[in-house]
Image: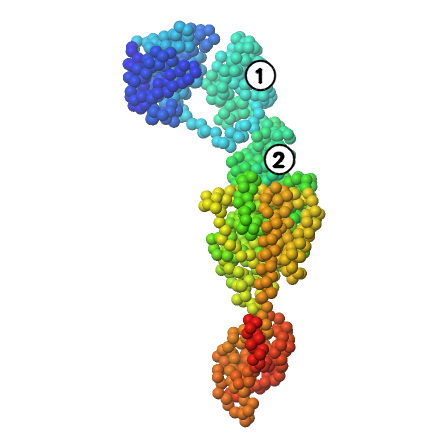
Amino acid sequence: METKEFLDSILSPEGQYCVVGHSGKKIVHKFYGSVDQIVTTAKDMDNNGLNAFYALASFKEGTTRKVDNIKHLKSFFLDLDCGLTKDYPNKGEAVDALRRFCKKLSLPKPVMVSSGRGVHCYWPLATEVDYKDWLPVAEKLKKLCAVHNLLADPAVTADGARILRVPETHNHKSDPPLDVSIISKGINFVSIEEFTDLLGGVSPIVEDIEPSAVSNKHYENMENSFKRILERTSKGNGCGQIKYLIKNQADISEPLWRGGLSITKFCVDGEKASQFISKHHPDYSEQKTKDKVEGIKYPYWCTTFDEHNPDICTECPFWGKIKSPLVLGSRVKEAEESEEDIERDLGTNTQDSIPTYPSPYFRGKNGGVYVRYSNADGDPEDKLIYHNDLYVVSRLKDPETGEGIVMRLHLPRDGVREFTVPLTAVTSKEEFRKHMSMQGVAVTKMDQIMTYTTAWVNELQLRKEADIAHKQYGWVDSKCEAFIVGREEITKEGVKSNPPSTHTLSTIDNFQPKGTLENWKKALDFYNRDGFELHQLVVGASFGSPLVAFTTVHCGCANLNGDTGIGKTAVQHAGLSVWGSPKDLLIEEDDTAASRMNRGEVYHNLPFFLDELTNKDPKELSDLAYRLTGGRQRNRMMGGSNQERYRGDPWQLLAVTSANGNLIEKIGLLKTMPKAEAQRILECKTKRMKFETKEETDEFNMLMLNNYGHAGRIYIKSIMNDIEGVKKLLKEVQLKIDTTAGLTAQNRFWSAFMACSMTGILLAKKAGLVNYDTKKLFKFMVETLRKNLHASNDMGASVEELLNDYIHEHYSMVLWIKSTDDSRGDSLVVPEALPKIKLVARYETDLKKVYLLPKPLKKWCGMHQVDYASFLQDLKEKMNSTTGLVRLSKGTHLNLPPTRVIIVDCNLDKNNETERTEDL
């Protein structure tokens, strides 16, 4: 029989065929569409000294020799190994055993091929079959080989992707190479139905599900003990196969002996156990046993034991419940204390250790939460509660939500996640499920994790008192011994974890560092050039914000005003990059007024940068000026309860706003004299400053937005090392600024802003964070202060100007009429203009006297924040005003009684008028 005829009978007529060349060092796979190409390629490989194999299956695609790519099979096959150390000493005994096996089962005569060292045998099928139909029959053939003691290699019989040697080639493992040849002369085809019946029928194969990542992680935590298997077996709840092979060591088959060794190999006490179960075997030697163990790759499954030794496993209470006897000796390896020290991946510089879990819970060696209990037989059992590390870090006291707990979750791809759960949720199934699911804990039996968490709470209540939930960033107290930045609590001794509270939860991750400190320095060094002093000032304000706590003011504020597109937002981003993510920390135009003030409360001592106030109305801008410098947001009631909302400590920080125009001038549209706001907001005119090239601008933006959050932490630590020295320096800088710029107590907000910003730059420069020219920056600060002083001094309005503004704003509400003093009685006078809405004043055009009703005048003064009493005093002293009873409607049809009015003579002499005109 020639090779092609043989292969045509064995292989499916459809699909891609695979030829494999094996040299011992490399393997070559080639796919072809015809049997002729298999024969040709195999001979070429053989001539080049390669062992030539072919796949028994045809494949859907010529890409891979894997089971899921199998198209058809057209034979069943066995591999009988022969040799002094093999299952059969020679080919003759192997063929005799095969013939006895076929006779017992009435199987047709197979086609046999000498593989050089053994025998391959085939039962060609009449037609090709699918892999799913072939597999159960092949499995049954494998089992019957074990039952009838035919020592066929069990790894071959049911392997649909198996390769065997091509006839008429050579086995190059021997020297000289041995012939691979067809022994049989004829071919007997059989249908799969007939072959199945001869085997006694088959059961459907349940495909194994590929182990999930969760299962694999669990298995990594497992530790197997053969001693434990023996202990359970001696009690009657162990493995019958292990019991059998130990009692019958002298008589068991080689496959069953190998099965026992496959269990011992994967046990921690396996070396000793393998000798124990082998010492009475007739072929036993210590070295031979070690060699046999060395060649084993996987532990036997229960089904494999059953194939080699039937009628024992089916009586086992674990049959169908476990896959291998190895499970009976499994125990979860506990993490040792030294293994629990880890660095947390929370974007912080803190290091923590995973604490010891409360008994009876424990952590697996490779993570996960387990609980240990005793089963019905009194044996200890370990149960997986959750496959990832999950534990409680601490208890928290929150002024608003009451007591809570800080939990930490380790996710394999996302790192370590820390979150806060109210204690009220820990005791409520639905609330607990919501909180856990929101953080990524996905399990069906959440009640087990809930019980585990409750055990943690009780344990911590015994260990230590609850921590205080920090609701604000910045200095923890007036001692300035700790500073909160995001998830870190920085002290002189080091860095501790700061879990999120209800107030910091939404912003806490905005402070996580990104990129490197060196790249951040590179970005901020772009401002280290002449003309960029205003940009340096904004960076200084970011560094100087924590220093406001050492002053007597709550906030110093500067507004960057100038045309759009000149880098106002970019410089605010640069300043905020000191502490965290610039885009996330910057307060935007569309944020509500309440949310802005809430940010101020939460930021506490960190910089408050607010972008784009251009479209805000004057009233809102005036309120902003007062609230920022006031240090507290409005008091409000808590939603759903008759209780005041919690307010944190007053903030002390520096603020930088931006707008296309001057905020004080815009507030002046509402108020005649916005001097109070002008003292609270330092106006800084922004010039159009450009980098030398667009590439330089792009590089700056890229560096700044991808490297942040490093400098602030270094800066705070440097301050903590010499708090008193920093306070002294701040006072010296402030005194120099006040003296040089001519500031007074009235300018305290300006003074604080500039002093803290300048000191911040000096300290940052000393810490090696920036390298700006502080002398030029100081000069720029003084010039800016003097400009604001000049503008503020020119802001006052005279009493005449105020009276003019009042009359002109109420022109249509004034009765314009000639005097009736020279008329007889109450003769009618034709008015020049009658009030259209309501009457607020009478103006006698011939005498140039105005009679003002006090009530509307007082209201107007209040709206424009003009001090009413001072205004009246100025009218009296500078314009000789008087008060009296006057009938405002005198000379008209209205005959109303007299009312008290303010009488002002507006008939100024020409000299005063000329002098005033020249002053203007």
Quarter of the image for residue 461 reads: top right
Q: Which residue is mark 1?
A: 271
| Residue 397 % position (x, y) | 65, 47
SS category of the residue bearing label 2:
loop
Residue appearing at x 66%, y 47% in the figure: 468
Give the farthest residue toward the bottom: 824
Does residue 732 show up? yes
Could you tell me which residue is drawn at 58 percent across and 21 percent down? 268
Q: Disc 1 and disc 2: Cα gap in Å?
A: 34 Å
Q: Quadrant of residue 242?
A: top right
Which of the labelled discs sits on residue 545, or is there none?
A: none
Q: Quadrant of the N terminus?
A: top left
Q: Amino acid at mark 1?
A: Glu
Instruction: Report the mark closest to the observer, 1 or 2.
Output: 2
Circle 2: residue type: Ile
Q: Horizontal placement of 207 versus 511: left or right?
A: left
Which percent across, then down, holds residue 337? Answer: 64, 30
Give the image location of residue 171, x and y in percent.
Answer: 39, 10
Task: Residue 628 in the image: state x and y as whole percent.
Answer: 60, 57
Front-lying residue, 288 or 152: 288
| 39 in relation to 684, above or below | above
Q: Residues within 10 Å of mark 1 (few under 14, many from 20)?
A: some
Report the residue at 36% width, 14% height from top.
52
Q: Residue 191: tell me if it is visible.
A: no
* Residue closer to the observer: 151 or 747: 747
Examine the rendered structure and indicate whether residue 182 appears above or below residue 341: above
Above or below, 233 relative to 840: above
Along the polypeptide, which appears first: circle 1 or circle 2? 1
Q: State the residue at coordinates (54%, 37%).
A: 415
Mark 2 surroundings within 10 Å by alpha-carbon count, few (fewer than 14), some (14 through 19), many (20 or more): some
Q: Nearer the viewer, residue 770 or 321?
A: 770
* Residue that badge 2 annotates: 354
